[in-house]
Image: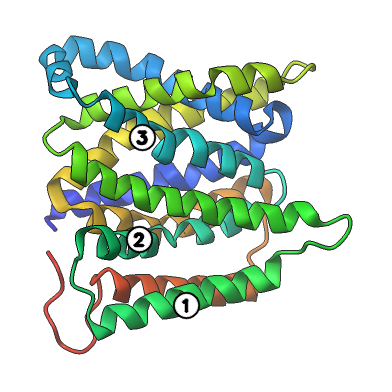
Amino acid sequence: MKGRDRLELIVLAALWGGSFLFMRLAAPAFGASPLAAVRVAVASAVLLPLLLLTQPKALAACRGRWAALAVVGLLNSALPFVCYSFAAQSISGGLAAIFNATTPLWGALVAWLWFRERMDAQRMLGLALGFAGVLGLAWDKASFKAGAQDTGLAVLACLAATLMYGVAANATRRWLTGVPALALATGSQMLATVALAVPATLAWPSQPASATAWGAALALGVLSTAVAYVMYFRLIAQVGPANATTVTYLVPLFAMLWGGLVLHEAVTPSMLAGGVVILLGTSLATGWWRPLGAARQP
């Protein structure tokens, strides 16, 4: 991975770390599906003019691939955004981001099952270690007791979202190779907007959202979605899905930072311990860290 790619990875992590703060601010006012719909609609409104002005011929690369774009729009945007907007109403942004860090684990597992990518003993150990960290953290934080079901459901929603991210990264690799990053980001967000239009309309809140909630929703759409997804799809094209999804190593750090600075969210010892185990397992499973002396993937 080149220096420019690493820098872009850090910027992307800061933007996606901010998304957990924005969801915490906006989700209680909008609800899960309306906030997700606003997010993808705003991103589409930013991306489509940009695409038409700068890369009008890029749309030609989408011909015959609209079904694949729809799958990616659903699995990489619409459904995960609903899941995280739901979770943001019950758990802290830092905790949600730690669960989000399992995305490369799912990506590696799906690549192994789908593309038959080689999975050596070190990577298998990483998968086992990473999922053990998830289980330990979920066991500590999730509750399905009366009056506290939302916490457990929030954890499950986060894990469902990360599984979908892992599938979407590999679907992008399988069906959308060669599509320019801006066209891919625009098409997927537009199709996600269509998919969420009816659910969001039916669930739209009766009380108008505050200016703070709208500001957070707009920042979520512009910064953490429109800008971030162009960067993300470019990274997939440049360094591959496995390396691109390692951005989630850094997202929890920024999510905890923004949440601590703005919302004064606490970082507990169990969160730190679980996060370390998850990141260690993920780095092994994706080949990012090779402690036994083998060369790390570029």
Provide residue 95's location: percent of width, then percent of height: 59, 59
Residue at the disc numbered 3: 71
Task: Name the residue rendered at 38%, 65% in the picture.
Answer: 105
Marks 1 and 2 sit apart, C-alpha to C-alpha, by 14 Å
User: Left or right: where does residue 140 sit relative to residue 190?
Assistant: right
Question: Helix, strand, or loop for circle 2?
Answer: helix
Provide residue 253's location: percent of width, then percent of height: 47, 59
> What numbered label is drawn on residue 34?
none
Task: Name the residue rendered at 28%, 78% in the picture.
Answer: 123
Question: Helix, strand, or loop for circle 3?
Answer: helix
| The C terminus lies in quadrant | bottom left
Residue at the disc numbered 1: 277
State whether residue 40 appears in this view: yes
Residue at the disc numbered 2: 104
User: Left or right: where does residue 238 sit relative to residue 217?
Assistant: left
Q: Residues within 10 Å of mark 1 (few under 14, many from 20)?
A: many
Residue 191 against residue 134 in the figure, above or below: above
Q: Residues within 10 Å of mark 2 (few under 14, many from 20)?
A: many
